[in-house]
Structures are given as structure tokens and as C-alpha cells.
Image: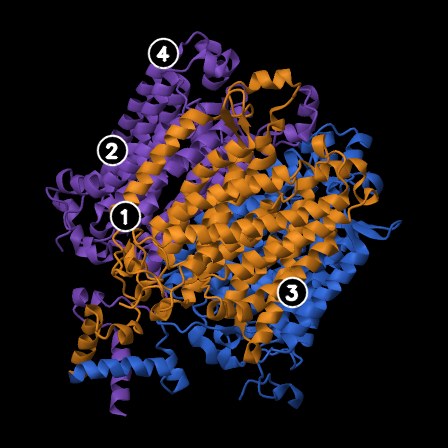
Chain colours: A purple, B blue, C orange
Amino acid sequence: MGNCVEGAKGYFCRPKNTNVRLSLPVVCFVWQIAMIILFGVFIRYDEESDAHWAEHKKSHNITSDIENDFYYRYPSFQDVHVMIFVGFGFLMTFLKRYSFGAVGFNFLVAAFGIQWALLMQGWFHSLDLVTGKIYIGVESMINADFCVAGCLIAYGAVLGKVSPVQLLVMTLFGVTLFAVEEYIILDLIHAKDAGGSMVIHTFGGYYGLGISWVLYRPNLHQSKRLNGSVYHSDIFAMIGTLFLWMFWPSFNSAITDHGDGQHRAAMNTYLALASSVLTTVAISSLSQKKGKLDMVHIQNATLAGGVAMGTAAEFMIMPYGSLIVGFFCGILSVFGYIFITPFLEKHLKIQDTCGVHNLHAMPGVIGGIVGAITAATATESVYSREGLVNTFDFEGEFEGRTVWSQGGHQAGAMCVAIVFGVFGGILVGLILRLPIWGDPADENCFDDEVYWELPEDEESIPPILEYNNHMTHKHQDISESNFSVEQS
Amino acid sequence: MGNCVEGAKGYFCRPKNTNVRLSLPVVCFVWQIAMIILFGVFIRYDEESDAHWAEHKKSHNITSDIENDFYYRYPSFQDVHVMIFVGFGFLMTFLKRYSFGAVGFNFLVAAFGIQWALLMQGWFHSLDLVTGKIYIGVESMINADFCVAGCLIAYGAVLGKVSPVQLLVMTLFGVTLFAVEEYIILDLIHAKDAGGSMVIHTFGGYYGLGISWVLYRPNLHQSKRLNGSVYHSDIFAMIGTLFLWMFWPSFNSAITDHGDGQHRAAMNTYLALASSVLTTVAISSLSQKKGKLDMVHIQNATLAGGVAMGTAAEFMIMPYGSLIVGFFCGILSVFGYIFITPFLEKHLKIQDTCGVHNLHAMPGVIGGIVGAITAATATESVYSREGLVNTFDFEGEFEGRTVWSQGGHQAGAMCVAIVFGVFGGILVGLILRLPIWGDPADENCFDDEVYWELPEDEESIPPILEYNNHMTHKHQDISESNFSVEQS
Amino acid sequence: MGNCVEGAKGYFCRPKNTNVRLSLPVVCFVWQIAMIILFGVFIRYDEESDAHWAEHKKSHNITSDIENDFYYRYPSFQDVHVMIFVGFGFLMTFLKRYSFGAVGFNFLVAAFGIQWALLMQGWFHSLDLVTGKIYIGVESMINADFCVAGCLIAYGAVLGKVSPVQLLVMTLFGVTLFAVEEYIILDLIHAKDAGGSMVIHTFGGYYGLGISWVLYRPNLHQSKRLNGSVYHSDIFAMIGTLFLWMFWPSFNSAITDHGDGQHRAAMNTYLALASSVLTTVAISSLSQKKGKLDMVHIQNATLAGGVAMGTAAEFMIMPYGSLIVGFFCGILSVFGYIFITPFLEKHLKIQDTCGVHNLHAMPGVIGGIVGAITAATATESVYSREGLVNTFDFEGEFEGRTVWSQGGHQAGAMCVAIVFGVFGGILVGLILRLPIWGDPADENCFDDEVYWELPEDEESIPPILEYNNHMTHKHQDISESNFSVEQS
């Protein structure tokens, strides 16, 4: 059927079998049972969610229940949660016939990913070596959601071209790589990255692009008719865009320091996002004759400011600094959709369905650079001595680190994220090329028909006629009834 | 017109009149005026929302405004509020031509229900016998939303088959029954049920099923063409699903104890829900040849874990315990959609439009059982002495109660919820069979046309042709224009 | 083309040029750069979002980070944020072919407006005369969102009839007028208006109506085919309605006093909104033969109770008082849609696309009146001495003001809002009539085609045929394929 990857061995050229009736249930069951066992062995409530909290309060002289971290972070957690499930899910519903897959597989992947992330992040960041347990609380849930965000970004690059089983495999390895990368960046290098410009967006973006490069489909044009939006699918996608845009301040501030840290991070992100919107509209209008706006740009590039503030959000970047970051990221992201995505597809053989390179990878890198510069130029007069120590955690073994050194470490962390993304993606892509995962043939990409029982729809898609070379049953019915009326 | 219930007296067999121009406004006006009068007589601000708060703070040595319960519970309240109005409302929009009714009547019913619930719950739980007043605050609003949830669950069972007037009557009695049942379960039996597995879901589910049983329509197949979804109505329904899923941790933790109680309840629910998603996908895939997923399962069974954690959410069920609960509830709920719903319809004459038996009644019962077991096996080593007393409120007249006894009381409470649901539903169903409420004929069920001024739509529904035996005006237009083209 | 305003000079009668490829990017770029410069000169973090917070805490004896205003107001801010971007945006998607413009231009306007509002409100309310800086925090963000709400309300009146450039101009002047009006009402007159019945809704409503009056289009009927909804656009609009409705308690309580003020404001609004829903349904049903409900009423008039509680929300209006306000506003708002909107269009030449007169202007005025009466009748026995001082801020130069005097000032403030709205609207309307802004011709109103690259859609709009007098390419295809089937 012509859907074999060039140069692949015959092994890879068998006709596609998209039946996942065996593999999908097996993967879901086995992995969920594994989660239960591992949670039983390792995961316990932390002191703020355990029934011993009353004793903990007394022993730590905590006078009020409101000091429980739950009240500092739970509203932010819920906003992040909405971003993960509604934001990412609906952002990807823009395709005319892949909305079930967009929102449904996003749901599946995220629900698995958060469990696995609690374990992986727990082992790397908070394993108690005495008891051998991981203690979780509201911050763990936020971090798990963050970790999953990386995998969902990668999903954007391969949207419509992979099976749910492949997505689960992508997530298994993605979360694992994420946890290691995060450990290196945050713990070993001691870089700051509260909103994850590097850890989440750069990694996630390149991870998806790496996978997409390995899974390159030269004959993807065979499903070109479905690789686009219709009017109402674009409106569904705006639900995703807006919930991401509105709650991004919560995303970037969710795990920053209590008090001024959360306050400042939210405000900086709010400003950068606002600025992005205006430059996105400007460039989108400029790029079309007659100045008409393109929904793809509005849905995506408006968010670039939030991505790029991920590292520096809690720094004293100043309100105008945030506006400047948003200003350039909006421009760059739209340029990406116009020039870079076609270039990547044509010359680098990277097919990026949602344009994650423009929305996550590039703005993520810029965010890392902005973070490095802002850190390197931090001064005591701006932060106060205590503020500087709090913001950059110059404590313990990092007590003597200078801001200049911190800036260098931030830049180094950036490189780690890129390397993990690119090489991790290539590695996982190779695994995903095994012909056992039930991925769709080139002519069936971007089609919910493959993995979903679809309702019999009245609003059918006429252009499909010319591709299928036969009338569907339903169309015949309509034509016949029309005909009979004309006869009567 | 053949739409009479078998064995009913001639009285019940008059042709259906769906004109609610008299009954709907009268019910709305009279009831709303009654609410105003009753609120005037009974309802006042509590000490935390009254302008005397400053004095209250001083007299109770409260040092900070942040100790006002508003800051502990308002974010949770807003999440619950979204679940009630967007969650339940959009979850029911899945029908191709009943989305107005789903989201609109849900809105109406909930807006009435919360007012009546403030009164009913106030009389039973917080009437000050000295002043004769009910004092309300943020927790009252959460409880009112909870109470309405029970009625909205019942709406799911009869969706598309009743008039808005019937829904208001259902809500009037539903809230009343709820308040009594809740008083018995929480105050007299002293069972714990923070997220309402028993009080809300079991009761609401069986209440709806009871009504649906009495209102059985043997000729419902006459509107079968409308009893299904179309592509975009399924996506609208996913908005409901996701907002329910995401905010369920807030639902189950909204009225639990400050501090560790809220923290733990949110986390347990988060985990159970994640687990449900994977088993739902697994069974849904297994159940279809070729392993394709069914949107009905994804929209509903993924939520079963949240329902089933309603009672035990604040207990020390442990993270793996939550995963196990979600694991089995996802499986059971999908099985319900595949086997039990058809069985109920065929053999028990219960038509359950949304499958509330699978999403609420069954998981609710399981939640009650899980709660009873978890309570009965609670130990001081796991909870600490103080934790045990706080969690189960072993205070005052219940000071001496053992966990074993508590488990028994939990199980008893479960039975109360079922009995109230079933018999309350049957009773209210009989009232709703009076031929004065404007319910639709069997051939007009699931059709917004009956109660809504619909826009003239371009995307009409062709299959309607064969049922109506005549062309609608619009279709004729199209056919004619087609015809003229062919002539030219 | 007959689209000239009567009596306008020939200058205004040139054929419409809707190409905004020059003007839109220029306006976006220049204004965004101006924002960056002005933010650089004027805007700084306030003491709660600055890294010096640790020092501030010590110097002010603040013992806990939870006392940072962020934790009092951020959840409310996020709810308000959702109302601005999803609430207003989706509420306006009801038009069948203007959903991109509704949600997209709403996004653009709000993103610009919040930046400009931070500056304008900063200059008027919180400019530090010593340092020459404006210090911003979470409350500033809420106020900026509030300010933008006024402009978005005005957008509702001209929806579908203006270009994005005109909207940005409207917003520039709207925010400016708002800041002055707000300064007069809140600072000089010292009126209370926490939820902005006067400052936001009355001003915004009349501002939009004033603009619409000047921009009157006598031949608007030429695009009548697009000035209506379709089935699924009405459901999209319900997303907007519900998020506005649910989060209105947060809107009215967002900047009220910590503690009882926020608590009471949220509760009063919750009750008024519930009451509105029932009377809206009642009157909507009464107004149609057969008692069918009209989606326009449900989408809008249900919100009137929230608008009308904007001033009195934090007063001791009592729960039944809130219900009464909602009761009458629901009725009045539906009457507005049935009688007043057609009257305004026919006799006053005011075309009000979304009916902002019924949803914002009228209920806003009522809210102002309710506020004046509630303030004038406040007593020490109801509020306590301290409560009265706190609620009405009878401090400093206003220490001696009586409640009676406060009532009078509230009424005066009402008039200021109306005057600013009407005359500001007329003034800005005249500016917008300059033929340089790229507004659409009368026959192209309510059509996304003018400013958006639209996807090639399958679900085309047949009735367009009779207006365009030619078959579109796509329709021909379908007809031909039908024809060939009939031949075979």
C-alpha cells in the first residue's frame, strides 16, 4: 500500500493492522496493575495529608490549618489540571475528524502519566532513604501534571499519526526521561525552572519532534483531506487555547516560593501572555494578503509568551521585561508556523502536526536563555540579600554560588533539556517503529474512524467522495429521496 | 397515539399536550416567590459572612481574616459549582438534538434546587432553635450544590423524556427527600460521607431509576432516531466529562476537615479517577470488535472512580487503595453500559438515558461499601489517636463508638440511601404520571423542538424524512435548487 | 453600494475597504511598543510581589506568607479572568458565522486592554507621587480585568459590525474613559461599587450603545441572513453564559474587604443569580406561543441578577433581598429583549447585536439604585459600628459621612456612569466613523469571512444562495454528484 518508510526493511512493510483490541487492553491492565503494586510498595501520604497532621502541627509550632500547603497550592493545582486535560485536549481538537482522538487520547495518556510520574519523580526527588517510601502531597500532584505536560506536547507533534498504544509507550518513556532530565537540571545543576521552559517545553517539544522524525511518513499527503480544520472544530480548539492562556499564570507560579514568589510569577506570566497576543495578531495579519487572520496562529502563538516565561517568571524580570519577552515570542512563533514548519517538513523530514516546534520548543529555548540572562544579571539591590537567596536557593552546598555562575548553570541546563529531548525522541521513535503497535496507514491518518466507534453522522464530509471513489450509503439515501421529490 | 402506559386508566391516555406556557411560568413564579418569603423568614448570614465578623473575630481570638472559612472552602466551592452547571449540563449534551434541553433544563433545575436546598438542609441541620433562623455561609452553598447534584443525577435517567415542569417537581421532592435522608445518615446514624457516595450518588441514581421505572414508555423506540449522538455533540459532552473529572477532587474534599482532611481527600480522588480511565479504556476496547473505543464509555465510566471515593476519600485508604477502587469501578461501569443498561430496559422496564445506574448508582454503592470497610479497619497506629477522633468525629454522644461499630453504621447508612432512592423515586414517579405536566409524546422524546424555539438550521437531519413522511420546507428548497441546477 | 450613513458627507460614502493588513499590524505593534516603554517608566512590583517581601514581612510584623494578598484574591482573580476571556468570548459566539470574530477579537481587545488599564488605573489610583511609580499586584490585575469588561460589554453592542482596528480604538478610549469615571465615582464621590454595577456595566452598556447609535447602519438588513444562530452556535454560547454565571460571585467579591466582605458578596450574588434564572425562564416561556423557551433569553437574562448585585453585593442586603433583586432583573431583562431592543432599533436607531442594554445597561442602573437604597438604609444594629465603617469606608476625610448621605452619593455616582457612557460613546463613535478603520459593508456584517482565513467547510450555509444569486463551487459539486447518481 505504499506506506512503508523508505529504506526500512521488509519487516516494516507489512500492511498496517490497526486492530488494538489485544494490545490496548493488555497495556492498560498490566500497567495499571503495576502502578497499584508500586504505589503499595512506595507511595505514602506526606505529613500534611496524613492523619498525623495534628501531631505534626504541634511538633512544628504550626498554629493554623491554613498553613497546610494545600491552601497555598491547591487553587493553582486545579488550574494546572484544567490546562492538562481541557487545555491540551481541546487545543488539539482543531482537526476536522480527529477530535475524539485529540481529547480522548490526551485524557488516557495524562491519566496514566500522572501515576507513573508520581513514582518516577518520587524516586528521583523525594525518596526517603530511611523508610524507602515516597511521601506525596499537593506539590507532588502539580509536579506529576507538569511531567505529563511534556508528554502531551510531544503528542502534538505526532497527532493523528500514531495509535493509542504508541502514545502510552511514548508516555512511559517520556515520563522516565523527564524525571531523569529534571533531576539533572533541578537537583544536580541546581538551575531554577519553575514553569518549565526548559524542563517541560524544550524537552517535550524536541522529544516529540525527534519521534516524528523517526516516524516520518513520506506519503502522508494521502490523508491530506483530513489534515485541516472546519469552522466549529476551530472553535472547539479555542476552548483549549483560552484555558491554557488564562491559567498559564497559575502554571508558572504553581511551585514557586510561597508569598512574593507565587505572586510575582503569576503577574509576569500574565503580562507576557498579553503582549504575545498583540504581536501574534500583527504578524498573522501581515502574513496574509488582505490582512486576514489565521486561526492556527491565534490558537497557538498567543501562548508563546507563557512558555517563554517559564524559567524567569519568579525572577525580578520587571513588568516591562515580561512584556518584551512576550512581544518577541509572539512574533517568532507566528514566523515559525509560516516558515519553519514547512521547512522542517520539506528539508528535515519532520512532520509536526500541531506545530509544537513553534509553540513549545523555540519559545522554550528562548525562555531558557531569558532565564540565564536574568539570573546572571540579578543584583542584591533589586532582590535584597534575603530575596536573592530565596529566589535562587543559594543555600546548603550552593551557598557560595554567584549569580553569574547561576546564569551559566542555567544555560547548561538548557542544553541538557535539548539533548534529552532530541536523543530521547529518536530512541523512543525507533521503538515505536516496531510494527506491533497498531499505527494507522498513511491514508488513514487524522481519522477517528480508525480507533473510535463513530456515531452515524448527518453532517458527513462530501469531499471524501472524490477520494473514496464511491458514494457512501448515506449519500445515496439523500440523493434518492431528493430524486423522489423531484419525481412527485 | 399509542403513547399510553399499559394498564393505565383512560385518564392517562389523552393525547399529549406539551404546551407549558401556563404551567412553567406559574411554577417558576410561585416557587420563586415562595423562596423569597421563606428566605425572609428563615435565612440570615452566619457569623463569618455577617458584618459583625469583626466583633466575632475579637471575641473568638481569631487573629486574621484568612481564618474565615471562605478562604478554606471558596476555591472548592467554585469547582463544585462548575461541576454542577457545566459538568452535569454538558455531560448530557451528547444527544444529537437535545443539547438545549440538557444544558438549559440542568441550569433551571439547579438554580431552583440550590435555593430550596438551603432551606431544607438548613431546617434539618442548622436551624437555631433559639432565634428560629438558619445561618448560611460558604459551606451551606457547597451543601446546596451537593444536594442539587442528586437531582441532576436523577435527571440523567429521564433525560429527553420529561418536561421542564416535571423536572422542577422532581427537584422539589428530590431536594426534600435528600435533606431527610442526609439528616438520617449524617446526623442520626453519624456516618461519614464527605463526597456523597451514598447520600448523593446512590440516592440520586436510584431516585432517577425509580422515576424512570414508573414513567416507562413502551413505545420509546418511536424516537429512536434522536436517541444517539453526532460527532460534535460527543465533543460537547467531553467538556462536561472533563470538568467533572478534573474537579472531582474538589467535590470530595469540599466539606472535609480543614488541613489534612481536605488534602488527603483531594489526593485520593485524583488517584482513583486516574485509575478509572485506564480500565475504562481497556474494557471499552475489549468490548468492540477491532478494539475501537466507545465515546459513551469514555464520557462516563472514567468518572466512576470519583463516585466510588465519595465516602472513603478522607479516610486513610492509602494511595494504592484509591487506585484499586478506581481500577474496579472503571471496569464495572463499562460492563454496566454493555450488559446492565440493556438488561434493565428489557427486563425491568427501566429506561436509563444517560446510564446513571452505571455511573452513579453502582459506583455509589461500591463507594459506600468501601467506606464501611475502610472505617471498620481503621487503626490508631495509622490515624493517630487524634486523627481517628477528627476523621470520624468520635466526639460528644459518639465519643465511645468503635471503628468496628462505625463500619456497621456506614453499611446501614448505605441501605437508607438505597431505600430513600428507590421508594422516593417510585412515589415521585407516580406524581409525575399525572397528565398535567406537559411531557412529550413517545415520538417526540429527545427532541428540543418540543420545548425550545430552535434556530432555522442549515445542518438539518435527513433521516428525519423517513419518520415524518413528508419533506420539511427547507429540504424542499434545497432539492428544488438542486433540481434547477440539473435542468440548466 | 448603498451602505452610506444617511446625511453623511461624500467623504464617508466611499466603498468599504476591509483590508486591515496595514492598519491592524501597525496599531498592534505601535501600541504594544508604547506599552513596553510606559511600563518601563512607570510600572513596578508592589511590596507583596517584590523580592523585598521578606523584609516587608518583618517590618510589618506579618508572621506568615499566607497573609500575602495573593492568597486572598488569586482564586477570585482566576475566576474573573475566565469570565473575561471565555465568558464574554463564548457568550458572543452565538452568531452562526461570527464565532471566530467573537472569541478572537474579544481575546485581542482584552489582551490589549488589561495592559492599558494597568497604566490608566495606576495613574489615577495608585501613582506614588514620591517615586513616580505605579506599584502593581494581584488586585491591580483584577481591576485591569474589570476595566476591560466595560469595553467588552461595549463590543457586544457592535458585534459583527466593526473591524478589529475599530475595536482596538474603542478599547483605547474606553479604558481611558473608564479610569476617569472610576476615579470620580470611587475616589472623589467615594461611592462603593465592588462588582461594578455602575462603573462597569452601566458605563460599558451605554458606551456601546452610544457608539452603536453613531455607527447606525440603515441597510443592516442586507446581512440579516447571518444575524442569527444555528443549533451548535447556541451551545457554544452557553459555555460563555455558564462560566459568567458560575463565576459572577467571584466577580462581585474579588476586590471587596477581606473576610466577611468577600464572603457576603459571593453569597449575595449566588442567590441573586439563582433567582434570575427562574424568572427568566418564566417570562421567556410566557412570551412565546406554546410556551417554548428562547435561547437568547436563557443565554443573557439569567445573568442580570449578577449585574444588578454589583453595587450592593457586600452590603447587608440580606439573602432574601438578593433574591428579590434577581427576581425583578430576570423579568426586566427578558422584557428588554422582547420589547426594548426592537424599539431601540426602530425608533432610536440603535442596533444592539447582543442586547447589552438588557443585560448590562438596565440591570446596571437597577444595581446602582439598589446600592443607593441599601446604603441609605444601613443601620448600626445590622452592621455593628465597626462593620458600618468597614463596609462603607467611613474613614479619613469621609469619617463623618452618614449612611443617608452615602445613599445620595451612590445615586450621584450612578448619573456619572451614565453620562460618561453616553457621551463617551457618542464621541468615540464619531472617531470610529472615519473611513480609515476597515469596517465591513452592510452586506458583510456578521461574517467572519471578512477578517479571517476560513477553513473550507463542509457544512456550508445553503440559504446564502438566494442572496448571492450564484451557486458556490462546492454546491455545484454536490449537485452534480447527486445528479450522476440519479442517472445511474
Q: Nearer the viewer, mark 2 or mark 4?
A: 4
Q: Are marks 3 and 2 on the same chain?
A: no
Dot 1 and dot 4 residues touching (CB under 8 Å):
no
Dot 2 and dot 1 residues touching (CB under 8 Å):
no
Q: Position of residue A53 (x, y in %)?
A: 66, 28
Q: Residue furthest bottom?
A: A488
Which of marks 4 and 2 precedes in the sequence? 4
In which quadrant will I find the N terminus of chain A?
bottom left
- The quarter holding residue B169 reads bottom right
Q: Are marks 1 and 3 on the same chain?
A: no
Distance Cα–Cα, label 2 vs label 1: 16 Å
Q: Nearer the viewer, residue C314 or A444?
A: C314
The residue under label 2 is A427
Q: Nearer the viewer, mark 1 or mark 4?
A: 4
The residue under label 3 is B207
Which of marks 4 and 1 precedes in the sequence? 1
- The quarter holding residue B430 reads bottom right
Q: Chain of mark 2?
A: A
Q: Position of residue C432 (x, y in %)?
A: 37, 52
The residue under label 1 is A162
Q: Position of residue C3 (x, y in %)?
A: 31, 65
In the image, is residue A157 above or below residue A51?
A: below
Q: Chain of mark 1?
A: A
Report whether residue B330 is seen: no
The residue under label 4 is A405
Q: Residues within 10 Å of mark 4 (few under 14, many from 20)?
A: some
